[in-house]
C-alpha cells in the first residue's frame, strides 16, 4: 500500500507563492506517474500538473503553465508543486494522486489514479 500526505497549503495574497508537498510512504513514488488535482466546491477535481515515473516528463494545465512547477525528490519520496503568481482562481483543495499508467499528452483523469492523499487547502485572497 502507498500512503500519501499533502502539506503546505494555506492563505496567500494574490501574486504570492506556496509550495505544496506530498510525502509518500509504503512504496517508491518513482513506480508511478503522479498528479496534482484541484477541487473547488461544486466542481469535479481537475488535474493541475503531472509528472511521469521517470521524472522527465511534466504536463501542466493551461491555466497554470508558466506559474506552477511540479517536481519530485526520490531520495525523500516526496512530490512537490511550486505555485507562483497565485490568483484567486487557483484556490481550492489540492490533492496528490498516483497511478500506474504512463503519461500521455495530458494529465490522466482522476479515474486512472490508484492512490490519493486527503488534500491540502489553498486560499488566495487579499
Image (cartoon, helix red, strand yellow):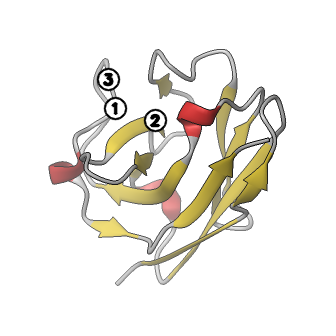
Is residue 91 positioned above or below 106 on the image? below
Q: Is residue 123 above or below residue 47?
A: below
Front: mark 2 or 3: 2
Q: Pointer 2 and pointer 1: residues touching (CB < 8 Å)?
A: yes
Q: Position of residue 100 (x, y in %)?
A: 26, 53
Residue 16, quarter of picture = top right
Horizontal side of 87 relative to 42 (left or right) equals right
Q: Which mark is residue 48?
A: 2
**Visible in this render: residue 77?**
yes
Report the residue at 56% width, 29% height from top.
Answer: 56
Residue 80 in sight: no
Badge 1 local density, few (<14 within 10 Å), some, or many (20+)?
A: many
Query: Considering the image in quadrants, where does the C terminus appear?
Result: top right
Q: Secondary structure at mark 3?
A: loop
Q: Earlier in the sequence, mark 2 or mark 3?
A: 2
Quarter of image, res 67: top right
- At label 3, counting other C-alpha atoms closer than 10 Å, the crowd grade (few under 14, some 14-19, many 20 or more) is few
Most extreme residue toward the front is 126
Considering every residue shown, the one lying at the far left of the view is 111
Q: Quadrant of residue 104?
A: top left
Q: Earlier in the sequence, mark 2 or mark 1?
A: 2
Q: SS of the residue at dot 2?
A: strand
- Mark seen at residue 106: 3
Amino acid at each position: 500500500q502507498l500512503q500519501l500526505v499533502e502539506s503546505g497549503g494555506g492563505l496567500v495574497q494574490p501574486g504570492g507563492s506556496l509550495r505544496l508537498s506530498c510525502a509518500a510512504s509504503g512504496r517508491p513514488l518513482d513506480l508511478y506517474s503522479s498528479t496534482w488535482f484541484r477541487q473547488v466546491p461544486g466542481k469535479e477535481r481537475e488535474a493541475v500538473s503531472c509528472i511521469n515515473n521517470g521524472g522527465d516528463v511534466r504536463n501542466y494545465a493551461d491555466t497554470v503553465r508558466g506559474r506552477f512547477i511540479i517536481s519530485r525528490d526520490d531520495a525523500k519520496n516526496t512530490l512537490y508543486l511550486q505555485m507562483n503568481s497565485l490568483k484567486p482562481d487557483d484556490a481550492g483543495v489540492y490533492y496528490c494522486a498516483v497511478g500506474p499508467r504512463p503519461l500521455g499528452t495530458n494529465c490522466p483523469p482522476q479515474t486512472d489514479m490508484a492512490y490519493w492523499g486527503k488534500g491540502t487547502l489553498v486560499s488566495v485572497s487579499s
